[in-house]
Amino acid sequence: MTKFTRVRDFPLLESALFVLMSYSTFLMAEAAELTGVVAVLFCGICQAHYTYNNLSDDSRMRTKQMFELLNFLAENFIFSYIGVSMFTFPKHHFDPLFILAGFTCAAIGRATNIYPLSFLLNLGRKPKIPANFQHMLFFAGLRGAMSFALAIRNTVSEARQTMLTTTSLIVIITVIIQGGATMNLLRWFQIPIGIDEETEALSNQGVRSGNSTPRGHEWPDVTGPEPPRPNEKAFLARVWGSFDTHYMKPLLTHSRPTLLETLPVCCNPLARLLTTTEQMTQEGQSRVTRDSDSDLCIEENDYVQNEHRQTNVHRLDTLRGEVAAVDTRVHLIGLSGKNI
């Protein structure tokens, strides 16, 4: 709808449709007797990655700020409600053995997700995910609003009441104990705290320290282009990124390249039908868009550009220091023949 219509000419209507279409996924899932919460979750992921790029500038700002406010209010409400429900909800059923089994299974499930997947990712990834990061990811397995919302949906039977009680205890204990111990554990694992994501990513790429000065034969051209860097994403991430760039984004957004350029020639009639005039009239990659879900992500191009920029600044500073250290005294002879 946001791609093939002119709804972007009416930003207020566009924002309203964006919210209502999100809520419609919850209603459809509930009507089909499925989980509406999970449906909204995946709807949000897709909207942040695709639909957000089709919105007008006014709608982007409006929807982003509105959802940030709703997220803040809902997060505070749900955690307050979890704490209050432990003392006011009349249908709690405590089963110590089931509660202990719930904690054990949650820990085992978290471990079987973190360590094997990190091992598989490290097979084709540079830099590797270090062991201390894996331990921190395992410890950070907090349970929260999603599990509680699913558990409180139905408390008719005794078994479901036991499930709600166990879930509430797991949420409260993990948030208080694991969340409260996060800073101490970060220091214990020697994971840097308070470092900007971009700076940390550049340091992982091996940016030269500001205190080191290259030798004469190591000086490349200050303004020259950097050599191409190998793709350091995992194999599956590269495959999905390529498919997303060549097929999904051209289909669902106005991004380039278009489907006319990526699909086989035999599919040109269908590709032309799914390609808008705005896509056709763009000049190359002049329209640069950032997905709302990539605001905190550092793309590979950002690594290269930031490294190039910081390296050039370092080289220029070093050149200035060397020029400042040159002896600039001049020997002159005055009219009387004496040195000045």
Image (cartoon, grey):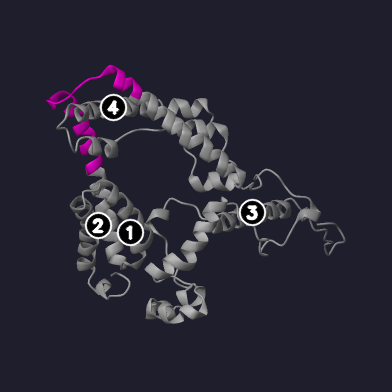
Q: Quadrant of the N terminus?
A: bottom left
Q: Which residue occupies the foreground of this view, 308 or 166?
A: 166
Q: Is the magenta stretch mostly helix, strand or loop?
A: helix
Q: Which of 269 and 190 is in front in this view?
A: 269
Q: Which amino acid does label 4 sit on?
A: Ile
Q: What residue type is labelled 2?
A: Ser
In the rendered view, tell whether residue 267 sits above or below residue 313.
Answer: below
Q: Do the residues labelled 1 and 2 touch (CB within 8 Å)?
A: yes
Q: Give how far across and how far down residue 115 sits, in percent.
A: 52, 34
Which comes sooner in the sequence, label 1 or label 2?
A: 2
Kindly identify which residue carries mark 2.
22
| Separation (CA) of disc 1 from disc 3 | 37 Å
Residue at the extreme right: 337
Q: Which residue is drawn at 30% across and 68% down?
A: 56
Per the image, the residue denoted by label 4 is 172
- Tell me if I can see residue 177 in this picture: no
Residue in the image at 42% along x and 32% along y? 109
Question: Which one is in front in this view, the residue at disc 4 or the one at disc 3?
Answer: 4
